[in-house]
Amino acid sequence: MNPTTIANVRDQSIESLSRAGVPSPEADAELLIGHVLGMSRGAVQARAITGATLGMEDILAISDAVGRRAAREPLQHITGLAAFRSIELAVGPGVFVPRPETETVVQFAIDALKAVPSERPIGVDLGTGSGAIALAMATEVPHAQVYGVEVSPQAFVWTKQNFRTIAPDNATAVFIDLADALPGLNGSVDVVISNPPYIPAAAIPRDPEVRLYDPEIALYGGEDGLDIVHNVSSTAARLLHPGGTLVIEHGELQAAEIAALLRADGWHAVSSHRDLLGRDRATTATR
C-alpha cells in the first residue's frame, strides 16, 4: 500500500493510539486527520476508501497530532475544540473539557427555562468554565437571559471567547466567585445550574487526560467532594425566586449525600436522576 494514502496513515494512527491505551483510537485518529486536513470525520473515511493521498507536510502534521494524543494529551486540546450538544466550544489548557454526560444534565435546566411563563426567563450557570452549560441554555432557549459565573482567570479566558462568539446577545460571562455571584439578581432567577468540582481530595482520577490536564479547581471539592456544593446551594437559594429550579451535576455515588444536604438547606422536591448508563448523575430541587 502507498504509505502516503489517507487509508494507510489512518491505520498507522489507530495502531499508535491503541498501543498508547487511548480509549477510542479509531474515532480519535479520524478526528485528528480531519483536523489537519480541514474536513469532517465522514469525509476522512470517504477519502480513505477512495485511495486519496497526502502530501508530506500533512503527513508530518498528522504524525505530530497523533503523537500528542498518544501521550494522552486530550483530543480537544489538540484540535482546540470541544463539541457539546449543538455548539462547538474553544478549549485548551486551563479550562475543564466538557463531558458528554453533562449534555443530559443540562437538559433539565433547558426544560425548566422553557417552562417559565416569562418573555425573558433568567438562567445562571455557577462555575461555567468553557461556558458549555450556559451557552447550551442560551442557544436552545434564545429568549432567555443567561449568566455564566467563573472564578478561574485561566478558564475565564475561554469563557469570554466562547460567550462572545456563540451567544453574544443573551449570554453574559461574569468573573466572580460563585459564592458571591450576582447579588443584583437576588430573588429573580428562574433556573440555577452547576457542574461544580465534586471529586474528593483523595480520589485522584485514573485517566491521564483528566489527572494531568484538567485544572484542579474544576475537579476537587474538598475532603468529601461537597465543599463547593454547599456554596452552590446557598447561592442558588439566594438567587432563585420561590418555585425556581436548581440543577446540580455530581458523581454517581453522591446522590444521597447531596439530597440530604439540599433538604437540610430547605430545598423542596429534591430528586436524583440517572444518566444514559444508569448512574446517578444529577439532582434537581425547587426553591
Image (spheres, rainbow, N blue to C red):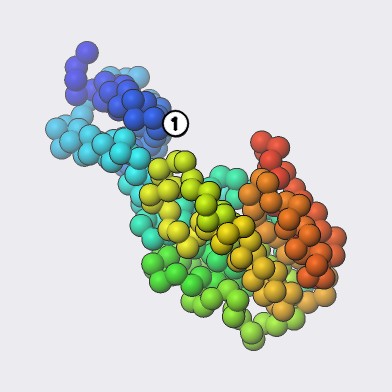
- Please determine whether, in this image, residue 6 is positioned above or below residue 191: above
- Please determine whether, in this image, residue 180 is positioned above or below residue 57: below
**Farthest residue in the bottom direction?**
184
- The reply, left or right, for residue 81 in relation to residue 9 is right
Q: Give the camera-side residue of 27 and 196.
A: 196
Residue 23 in the image: x percent, y percent?
45, 32
**Farthest residue in the right direction?**
269
Q: Give the camera-side residue of 188 and 236.
A: 236
Residue 158 in the image: x percent, y percent?
41, 64
Residue for point 34% across, 44% down: 73
Residue for point 66% across, 45% down: 252
- The reply, left or right, for residue 48 in relation to residue 221 is left
| Category of crowding for the residue at label 1, using alpha-carbon neighbours closer than 10 angstroms: few (below 14), some (14–19), many (at least 20) | few
Q: Quadrant of the C terminus?
A: bottom right
* Residue 135 found in image quarter: bottom right
Residue for point 19% across, 20% down: 3
- The reply, left or right, for residue 58 in relation to residue 86 is left
Q: Total marks drawn?
A: 1
Residue 109 appears in the figure: no
* Residue 5 found in image quarter: top left
Residue 49 appears in the figure: yes
Type of amino acid at the residue the image marks with label 1: Ser
* Residue 43 found in image quarter: top left
Residue 210 in the image: x percent, y percent?
44, 47
**Farthest residue in the left direction?**
56
Q: Quadrant of the N terminus?
A: top left
Q: Give the camera-side residue of 146 and 149.
A: 149
Residue 78 in the image: x percent, y percent?
32, 46
Secondary structure at badge 1 equals: loop
Residue for point 78% across, 59% down: 260
Q: Which residue is mark 1?
A: 24
- The reply, left or right, for residue 278 in relation to residue 10 is right
